[in-house]
């Protein structure tokens, strides 16, 4: 049995920043995630997608953001348990929580913070008999290595943000690119839709309205994608790779059975503490809902800060926690490793030459 202050379920950006906010308050954390690596959707779905709305960081990729968050929480030495799914959560008589994972780990935690993003999710797949053998080779539901498509003929299917983002990202790398969408209405950001249409007008990519009805292969490699257009005609598009971005099947998985109040498959929380309907269980990030909720990484960071104070109050009822600032607080600076403890030499600080 692993005994700890807090268990964080989810190692996406908000879960990682939750480690930092708990650490500033002197609380240790164990982080559990079903994926074999930290990063959540940022790594699994958009590792190279540019992010522009992180304060003081004009631009970074999802991969870079996760790397920076991991560096930031290093002083607090969080314990990660990756490749584990929390299968059960039980509130014990003493008010603490017992959790079990799919690999047999057991935890005794003072608080539980759910930062599971969309929960257990899987991509909506292409339901064609010839598709299964091509997955991972010529048929892709995520992009892990953009260089794989350099100088290739590719088809991207979808009309949401993921499809448009990758079309705009890859258009300069590929030999040809056709975007296939069932209608002329897109769910993506209007600026990206306008940019896509401009690229089509310039002849740098094509848009085909229709439904994918078949795949043709040559020597077990993709050769053509068959699309039934709005007119009913079947068009054959030459392609060596097909990227399908039809969204995800979000599901809470085991979390749905823990007795927490739900609204549209999201956890209902108090926006002043981010506590769920069970005292001591909190939820931050995309998995929660409250009036005015905005599904932004930035909002999740704010939620993690308030949640940390609420978690501390739950663990230490009656203790007053004064708001401190990392710029001036010796206690916080010692926890961050930038100020030496009494009787010890100060840490070495490397200064880059200019």
Image (cartoon, rainbow, N blue to C red):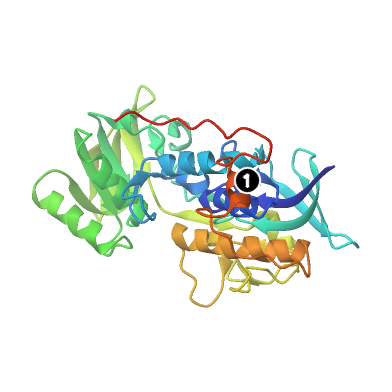
- Residue for point 51% across, 49% down: 13
Please name the residue that numbered disc 1 is placed on.
335
- Toward the right, the furthest residue is 93
- Toward the left, the furthest residue is 202
Along the line of sight, the residue nearer the viewer: 136 or 28: 28
Residue 212, image x, y percentages:
34, 48
- Toward the front, the furthest residue is 343
Along the line of sight, the residue nearer the viewer: 224 or 17: 17
Q: Secondary structure at mark 1?
A: helix
Q: Is residue 49 something one can see in this rendering?
A: no
Q: Is residue 255 something one can see in this rendering?
A: yes
Query: On the picture, is 258 further left or further right than 295?
Result: right
Residue 227, image x, y percentages:
28, 48
Quadrant placement of the N terminus: top right
Quadrant placement of the C terminus: top left
Residue 316, image x, y percentages:
78, 63
Along the line of sight, the residue nearer the viewer: 19 or 12: 19
Disc 1 crowd, CA 10 A, few/some/many (<14, 14-19, 20+):
some
Along the line of sight, the residue nearer the viewer: 322 or 50: 322
């Amino acid at each position: 049995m692993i005994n700890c202050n807090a268990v964080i379920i989810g190692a996406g950006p908000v879960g990682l920043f939750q480690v930092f906010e708990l650490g500033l308050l002197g609380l240790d954390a164990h982080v559990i995630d079903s994926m074999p690596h930290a990063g959540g959707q940022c790594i699994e779905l958009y590792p190279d997608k540019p992010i522009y709305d992180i304060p003081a960081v004009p631009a970074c990729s999802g991969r870079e953001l996760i790397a920076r968050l991991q560096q930031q929480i290093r002083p607090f030495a969080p314990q990660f348990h990756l490749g584990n799914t929390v299968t059960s959560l039980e509130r014990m008589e003493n008010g603490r929580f017992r959790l079990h994972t799919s690999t047999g780990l057991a935890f005794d935690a003072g608080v539980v913070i759910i930062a599971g993003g969309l929960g257990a999710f899987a991509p909506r797949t292409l339901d064609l008999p010839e598709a299964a053998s091509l997955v991972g080779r010529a048929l892709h539901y995520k992009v892990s290595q953009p260089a794989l498509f350099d100088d290739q003929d590719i088809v991207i299917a979808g009309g949401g943000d993921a499809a448009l983002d990758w079309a705009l990202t890859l258009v300069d790398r590929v030999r040809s690119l056709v975007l296939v969408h069932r209608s002329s209405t897109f769910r993506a950001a209007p600026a990206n839709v306008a940019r896509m249409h401009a690229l089509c007008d310039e002849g740098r990519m094509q848009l085909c309205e229709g439904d994918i009805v078949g795949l043709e292969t040559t020597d077990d490699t993709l050769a053509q994608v068959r699309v039934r257009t709005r007119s009913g005609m079947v068009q054959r598009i030459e392609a060596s790779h097909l990227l399908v971005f039809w969204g995800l099947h979000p599901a809470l998985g085991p979390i749905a059975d823990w007795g927490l109040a739900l609204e549209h498959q999201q956890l209902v929380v108090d926006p002043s503490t981010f506590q769920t309907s069970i005292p001591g269980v909190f939820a931050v990030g995309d998995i929660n809902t409250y009036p005015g909720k905005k599904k932004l990484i930035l909002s999740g960071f704010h939620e993690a800060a308030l949640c940390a104070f609420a978690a501390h109050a739950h663990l230490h009822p009656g203790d007053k926690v004064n708001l401190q600032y990392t710029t001036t607080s010796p206690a916080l600076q010692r926890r961050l490793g930038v100020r030496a403890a009494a009787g010890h030499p100060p840490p070495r600080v490397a200064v880059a030459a200019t």
